[in-house]
Amino acid sequence: MNINLPNFNVKNLVKEAGSTISRVVQLTEEKLGTTERTEYDLHFQNLAERADVTKTWTEKIVRDTESVLIPNPQNRVEDFIFEKIEKSKPKRLSNLEHLALDMIEAGGDFGQDLPYGQALIKVGQAEQKLGQCEHDFIATSGICFTQPLRKFLDGEMKTISKERGILETKRLDLDACKNRVKKARSMLGQQSKDGISPEAVLEQAERDLRVAQAEFDRQSEITKLLLDGISTSQASHLRHLHAFVQAQVRYYKQCGDTMEQLQRELANLGGPTPYIPLDLGDASGSKSTGSSGGSSARGTGHNSAANPAAFGNKPSQPMHVSTDQMQRARVLCSYDAKDHTELNLSANEVIFVTECSPVNEDYMYGKQGLMKGLVPRAFVEMLDEEHDITL
């Protein structure tokens, strides 16, 4: 049986092994500080350090952005594979779209003529719109932000890393030539070895040193030009960042418009428990008022959202309440809040309450853990009639 073995050039193998061993010895001596080392100039060191920082943080930003856009790591791996084999990515339904389909199907089964069924269908349709907005946002963010940054990492940064590697090799060659020149000078005046005079050895070593120095200087200039280009790249990254922010603004604006439309549709459905739209403008206004100081400001922000038309016994004017001094009260029976201004109560639980200012005959202001809101006076029994509890 004939076996064709590859032709190995033993001399080349020995030569390469010798060069590798010499390079390892050289690097070890540099680490130990037993040999001279050609240092890069300060400007080059600053450029190299900035390139390393840029590479590290750009990789983290791309990775974190992709995690935000596609939280499922398995999906990210699949998209990466399809991108590498240059095939279209699989179309997946988002969690919002899965929720939308189930809500619409459930609404149909519960009955499209019933309030709950109608509401489920309306909410499901809105969730579908939100899911589509999410798809558009992910695609736009990939095009305007993550893909350009990844292209920078795979292109420009890899080129810089390659040229820096070549420069490091040229530096090691230069230092090796310097050591040979130093050794040749130390042998001047000695007898010839192998028929070659020390002067000839020195002349050859100096010639090799001049060549190595020229190659090192040329590679150093090439690498500096590439490193200087990092500033231009960061200016481009800034434009991509602006585009990403604009995509986010459009995405959240579309989501807000969709939810406002959903609130109007739910309010128009009516039914035994009509939906009361949440006015985010009033809510934000009350927060800014509350942050200006004092417990009275917090009371104003809380009650400005009250709807006197929906809750007949609630005061029509904003109430100023104090939460500095409150009393304990036991809930007599369970109560379901009519809207977000009220607290849900469970029978026999103990909460803290205080009078509204001005006093309201139907409601008190209550604190339930971290929750605060209106409490119907008829559903609570005071426990601390004589002693106030300071929170």
Image (cartoon, rainbow, N blue to C red):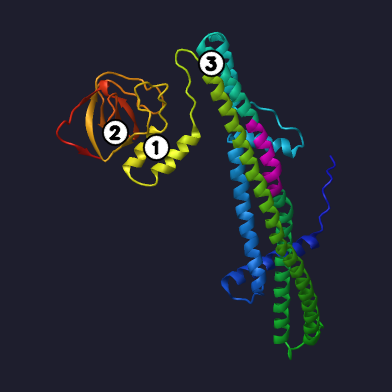
* Residue 80 position by quadrant: top right
The residue that label 1 is drawn on is 301
* Residue 122 position by quadrant: top right
Distance from disc 3 to disc 1, alpha carbons, whole Å, reads: 29 Å
Residue at (50, 15) in percent of width and height: 270
Q: Are marks 3 and 1 in contact (CB under 8 Å)?
A: no
Q: Earlier in the sequence, mark 2 or mark 3?
A: 3
Question: Which structural element holds mark 1?
Answer: helix
In the rendered image, the residue lying farthest to the front is 317
The residue that label 2 is drawn on is 358
Residue at (45, 12) in percent of width and height: 272
Which amino acid type corresponds to the residue marked 3 in the rendered image? Leu
Which amino acid type corresponds to the residue marked 1 in the rendered image? Gly
Residue 95, placed above or below residue 4: above
Residue 311, placed above or below residue 319: above
Which amino acid type corresponds to the residue marked 2 in the rendered image? Pro
In the rendered image, the residue lying farthest to the bottom is 189
The residue segment tinted magenta is: 133-150
Distance from disc 1 to disc 2, alpha carbons, whole Å, reads: 15 Å
Question: Which structural element holds mark 3?
Answer: helix
291 left or right of 41 in image: left
178 left or right of 252 in image: right
- Quadrant of the frame with the N terminus: top right
332 left or right of 316 in image: left
Q: Disc 1 or disc 2, which is closer to the eye?
A: 2
Q: Label 3 neighbourhood size at 10 Å, few (<14), some (14-19), many (20+)?
A: some
The residue that label 3 is drawn on is 269
